[in-house]
Image (cartoon, helix red, strand yellow):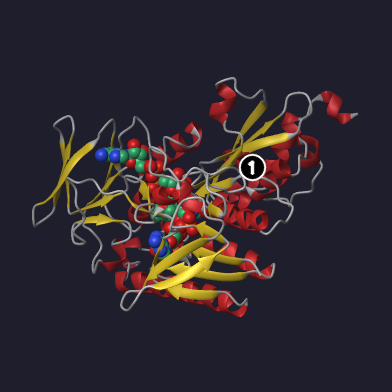
Amino acid sequence: MTRIVIIGGGPAGYEAALVAAQHGADVTVVEAEGVGGACVLYDCVPSKTFISSAGVRTDLRRASDLGVNIDLERAAVELPTVHGRVQALALAQSADIRARLQREGVRLVPGRAQIVDDVPGMATHRVSVQPADGEPVLLDADVVLIATGASPRILPTAQPDGERILTWRQIYDLDELPTHLVVVGSGVTGAEFVSAYTEMGVPVTLVSSRDRVLPGEDADAASVLEDVLHERGVVVVKEARADRVENIGTGVVVHLADGRTVEGSHALMTVGSVPNTSGLGLSKIGVELDRGGFIPVDRVSRTSVSGVYAAGDCTGLLPLASVASMQGRIAMWHALGEGVNPIRLKTVTSAVFTRPEIATVGISQAAIDAGKVPARTVMLPLATNPRAKMQGLRRGFVKLFCRPATGVVIGGVVVAPVASELILPIALAVQNNLTVKDLAYTFSVYPSLSGSITEAGRQLMRHDDLD
Ligand SMILES: Cc1cc2nc3c(=O)[nH]c(=O)nc-3n(C[C@H](O)[C@H](O)[C@H](O)COP(=O)(O)OP(=O)(O)OC[C@H]3O[C@@H](n4cnc5c(N)ncnc54)[C@H](O)[C@@H]3O)c2cc1C
Ligand SMILES: NC(=O)c1ccc[n+]([C@@H]2O[C@H](COP(=O)([O-])OP(=O)(O)OC[C@H]3O[C@@H](n4cnc5c(N)ncnc54)[C@H](O)[C@@H]3O)[C@@H](O)[C@H]2O)c1
């Protein structure tokens, strides 16, 4: 029986464990903090749960546009309840995953693991686990999967204190909402928290190192979000790199590299993540890290050392839970000799859970504009969609991209309140090489926001598609 030791119990680790157990391997997961990993305990699940509470206020705020008058002042946020719900849900999800792993026969070992092979190049591997208290445990493995994730990047001059200078993992311990939140970093994490706190009624200033929010996302989508944030009173300080953040007792002062300062009651640092790849004994066994500290892997999750695989945020491929899970599964299929397709990033779907949400799949507009991928494109504002009008939605759009000659759908972007759900038909089309004609001939419900997707398909059809 193949002995597999998985270091890290996040999506990469636990999904890999499920696959390996189902294929009859002897599987052990070593986890330092809790099954479900940072994804379930600190990052993805807590943030999306928090955002769900904020979303209620968004709906209430918009109610008057639809003729229902609600005094938003009376829709007070009960922060202990919101935070309690966030924490309870994370723990419950962790417990569900633990129970599922145990049902499948996966052994769970709490503690911090490192590889302790005697010499490089061994056919099998040895992992030492240091529990929180007690003696180290030694595990022998034919295959090791490193799935140790990442942690918030800390600026040495902006040390989180858990009181006023915070990482996104510390906000759920606050007793009260900030009176003025400064969010440093305008990537996906920063944008999501700016949107959520704004909807909760907190004045927010965003410090963005670039000339726009969400520099990695579709520019039109980011521009819609920026308009919405502006309308909601968010101040975006652009081209602004935080040098230092100071807790002055009554608040914070963010010192920018160009000498400007930004003041608030609290600072939320969302300046990226660093991979958890130190202390794992990697260089001793011959796994060299890249410049960012990530573990280089190929498209079936192999490292440069035989029998050692890596998956998820520690590899830096694409830091998404869905990608981590897929990398983990692929590692196990490969290690256990199953037929496996290398991971394809061109079909990855992702969403930014702001209000409105931004969801994307496949080839980006930036790649098309740069001439890297030939494509026909269309962008339909939601304002032309009947359902959107009924719901009072003024902003948002559907974009669709297809191959010029064949009409095969290669990507798309949706900006809408439920874009994370609406993107699926485009994702299905991209994954299965469907054409704009396939979309155009699909019945969508009338009236529906998804009608804009089938309409985009019709607009991209050429006359010869009709034959
Ligand atoms: C605020 C935020 C929100 C996000 N929201 C989303 C989202 O909505 N959708 C999405 O797809 N992605 C989201 N992501 C990204 C997603 O959380 C990550 O891509 C995902 O967690 C990666 O999973 P992983 O298994 O690689 O690592 P993790 O989830 O980080 O798990 C790794 C685990 O390994 C453990 N570990 C580390 N070192 C050791 C060791 N030596 N021994 C034993 N255990 C160890 C850690 O304790 C950790 O529990 C979000 C990220 C952030 C920061
Ligand atoms: N909804 C989701 O799926 C979701 C949510 C959050 C994160 N994620 C994943 O995590 C990845 C990382 O996102 P992120 O936003 O945490 O990190 P990021 O690295 O993408 O963004 C951090 C931003 O902070 C800026 N920055 C760095 N130092 C700064 C400084 N001193 N002053 C001002 N700005 C500074 C950077 O220029 C960058 O724009 C995303 O690409 C995504 O894959 C996904």
Say which residue appears at 53% left-offset and 70% top-offset: 28
Say if 375 sits above or below 393 in the image.
above
Residue designated by label 1: 344
Q: Nearer the viewer, residue 82 or 416?
A: 82
- Residue 295: x, y in percent? 46, 46
Say which residue appears at 68% left-offset and 69% top-offset: 22
- Residue 218: x, y in percent? 50, 35
Q: Few, some or many C-alpha atoms within 10 Å of disc 1 (few <14, some 14-19, many ≥20)?
A: few
| Residue 71 visible somewhere in the drawing | yes
Say if 200 sits above or below 432 in the image.
below
Q: Nearer the viewer, residue 370 or 155?
A: 155
Q: Nearer the viewer, residue 195 or 331?
A: 331
Say which residue appears at 30% left-offset and 77% top-offset: 133
Ligand 1's image quarter is bottom left
Instruction: Tell me the amino acid under the disc marked 1.
Output: Arg
Say if 97 sits above or below 13 in the image.
below
Q: Nearer the viewer, residue 260 or 283?
A: 283
